[in-house]
Image (spheres, helix red, strand yellow):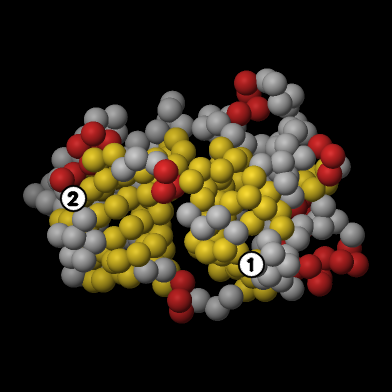
Amino acid sequence: MGLQHATVLNTHSMPWESGLDYLRTLAPAFRDNLGPADLVEANFAKYRQKNLYLDPQTTRRLDLVQLEAGYSDLTHCCHDSVEEGFLLAGNVTLDGEGALQTGDYFWRPPGWIHHAQTQPGVELLLGFEGQSNESGPVSRHVCSAHLAGANHLIAASDEASLGSRGRLCQVTASQLVWQPGEAYARGEGALAGFDLAHLSVRVLSRNPSTGQQTVLLRLAPGYQQATAGFHAVWWQMFVLTGGVQWGGEHFGEGVFVHRPAGAVEAAMASAQGALLYAKIDGWMDFTPAAP
């Protein structure tokens, strides 16, 4: 048997949702502040997405997003929520922050003013943290263009403006070292049963107090956890390349998995190897299931 308690989405079989349909899933504090009303429909015709995760209580969400060539935000803006993104293809220019390419990542604390535009188009995993830790509800404030790179909510010189993970405008993943599993695990708590010898990790961002983190996990061919078990916090994983198996069921490129905290699942394996984008809501710890 494969995964018993997790939510599994094969994004290849999901239809793209139009930008206007996407807006209906957002709080009024976001969708009512997009810019000139007569331009919104044409602008969001260039925006489409597939929702992977949405918590209506906190407004936390994760989406697979495509922006067509020539897309540009109607205004500069900032959010009360943390915004996070990982580029899968194409590039995007974020005014006040940088020109991001495929494989780049950003983590933006609340309040930082920015503007997105893409000439060739871009595909990315885009998340808002919503009401959690230092992050507020998903919202949008229209801001002046000349303030790009400033913080609307907190003085940019104030350490609090950096939040818990820092202001990471452009992290080029390919320039981060791969930490061997054994070295990475030293700060993560119990990982009994993990195949650390076949695991390496690139940390994209992390809260040093809570362990909440976004990482790239590289599973070498032959990865095999020793036993079924559970994590103390929820995990979200998106298969970038290769594939993983749980209980003999295969999950390939483009599959998203949300694994609830405390849910016992079969041992994870990867016969051919895999690269995973993973969000972990705390330390990675793993507890083997009782025999």
Neighbours of disc 2 within 10 Å: few (<14), some (14-19), many (20+): some
Q: Identity of the amino acid at label 2?
A: His
Whichever of labels 2 and 1 marks the residue nearer the N terminus, that label is: 1
Instruction: Assign a secondary structure to mark 1.
Output: loop
Along the viewing direction, whichever of 23 and 57 lies nearer the viewer = 23
Which mark identifies residue 138? none
Residue beneath disc 2: 198
Q: Is residue 42 above or below residue 62?
A: below
Residue 271 visible to an observer of this rendering: yes
Q: Residue at x 40, y 41 (%)?
A: 176
Q: x, y (%) of residue 177?
A: 34, 40
Residue beneath disc 1: 121
Camera-nearest label, 2 or 1: 1
Instruction: Assign a secondary structure to mark 2.
Output: helix
Does the residue at mark 2 contact the one at mark 1 (Cβ under 8 Å)? no
Q: x, y (%) of residue 20?
A: 73, 70
Q: Is residue 258 above or below residue 80?
A: below
Q: x, y (%) of residue 44?
A: 75, 68
